[in-house]
Image: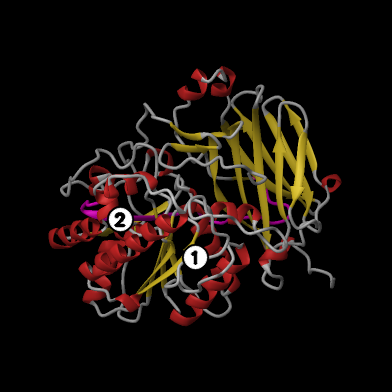
Amino acid sequence: MRGHGRHWAAIGIVVLAGGVLLLDSKRSTELAWTGSPSGSVILRPDDRVLILAPHPDDEVLGCAGIVQKAVAMNVPVHIVFFTYGDFYEWSFVVYKKRPVLTPKGVEGMGELRHDEAIAAAAALGLARNDLTFLGYPDFGTLDIWYSAWESEPPVKGILTKATAVPYKDAFRPGAPHKGEEVLHDLASLVRQFRPTKVFVSHPADHHPDHRALYLFTRVCLFDLEQDLSAQVYPYLVHYTNWPTPQGHHPEMALVPPGILQSQAGWSVETMSPPEMRRKRVALRAHHTQYETTPRYLDSFVRSNELFGDLSEVELRVGSPARSLSGHGTDTDTSEVERMGEQDALLVGIVERTVRIVDGDLVLSMELTHPLAKEVGASVYLFGWRSDRPFARMPKLHVRLGPVGHEVHDMTGNVTPSQVGVVHAGRHMEIRLPLAAMGNPRRVFTDAQICAGAIPLEWAAWQTLDIGDAAVSLRDD
């Protein structure tokens, strides 16, 4: 188990060392949308549409309407699949009527999902050469983001047991499961296709692969921003008790989950009845998935598709503290109570703020209650600047418990003594010099509250725009 552990919330599922814990939320996260979308997604004749999908079927769930409109306008479309979707073992049991136990058998199911994606694309008007499959480890790509950079070992696929892309028909077979390799592949494809609009998974999505793909995509586009400019449209797929109601309701509109309604600027793309029907046909082409969760997949066949992002937080010297996005999960933790961690139910994130003081980045967090026994908080801070490879920039993980804290930087550039931590009751503050972080121009950050390996609450990754607050990096 790697440094941060496998503490992911994915559609109400937490993967533990000993198995899978289902967290069945009693609360609905989708409220009446009192606001309104900020606009529509407008495709133009000179657009080039790139769709980045964590798994086969996400491209249809999030963007089938966009694909159809682009095809009708003869606008170029290319879809890139991050993984082959080879981790969802239950769907394999349902499809095969038996467990798939060997790595080769798992790869065979990955190839089946690959073929389903080709069939779904054909239903939407695309050809095989409009698709690219990267083949990174399903349910392991956030692990790559957290821990597999530079000299750190590659991530091993949970079911494939591979440490490099095992698929011969992938974009780059044999590519190690490492962060810099993911960025290399994305940059190669973006340079080649030169998109004007990029559709990608959402940073607040509860599935770790969806969050990971968003983060890698953001780094890639930041790295290439001097060469091309593309609008980014994140789409949400996995969120607790969302969409509601489940099932086939084409007469209804898709609206954001209640927690996210005010945290992102949302755009919509309306869908006509024929487009909705073709979207459902494309979904059914993903046979392994549709046979397993038809009501859930049909929930995305609505009168619109939905896109929204979290804004960069601009920080400048002398400016007041800025608020970051609220929590990213609305999971009922009653299962934790039954496990004997009753105090864990009391801890949540109330507010996070960030500011720059005397050349230091200061990140504060207020909790509902002090941390209890076996409950900890984690804050991640990854720096970026254009003139230094992202793999070599500091990547901090600050872990706080009821008593004491730990600081780890996988690159070894930042020492624990350079990071100031104040922890008093419900208040936490982390302070570190921007110079120690390599004078980043941007910082990626998130926060989590965990009971052991179980995530109680987490805040979506957000980007801090440091801008001129960072001074020029000295020559190494």
Picture quadrant of residue 170: bottom left
Where is residue 111? Give x, y as percent. 36, 63
Dot in front, 1 or 2: 1
Question: At label 1, which amino acid type do we have?
Answer: Pro
Where is residue 214? Give x, y as percent. 50, 58
Question: At label 2, which amino acid type do we have?
Answer: Leu
Dot 2 crowding, Cα within 10 Å, few <14, some 14–19, many 20+ = many
The overriding secondary structure of the stretch rendered in magenta is: loop
Quadrant placement of the C terminus: bottom right
Q: Which residues are magenta?
A: 300-321
First along the sequence among labels 1 and 2: 2
Asked whether residue 306 is drawn in magenta, I would say yes
* Residue positioned 68% across, 39% down in the render: 364
Quadrant placement of the N terminus: top right
In the picture as drawn, the residue positioned furthest to the left comes out as 274
* Residue positioned 24% across, 57% down in the render: 283
Picture quadrant of residue 71: bottom left
Dot 1 crowding, Cα within 10 Å, few <14, some 14–19, many 20+ = many
Residue identified by numbered label 2: 61
Q: Is residue 83 left or right of residue 267?
A: right
Residue identified by numbered label 1: 166
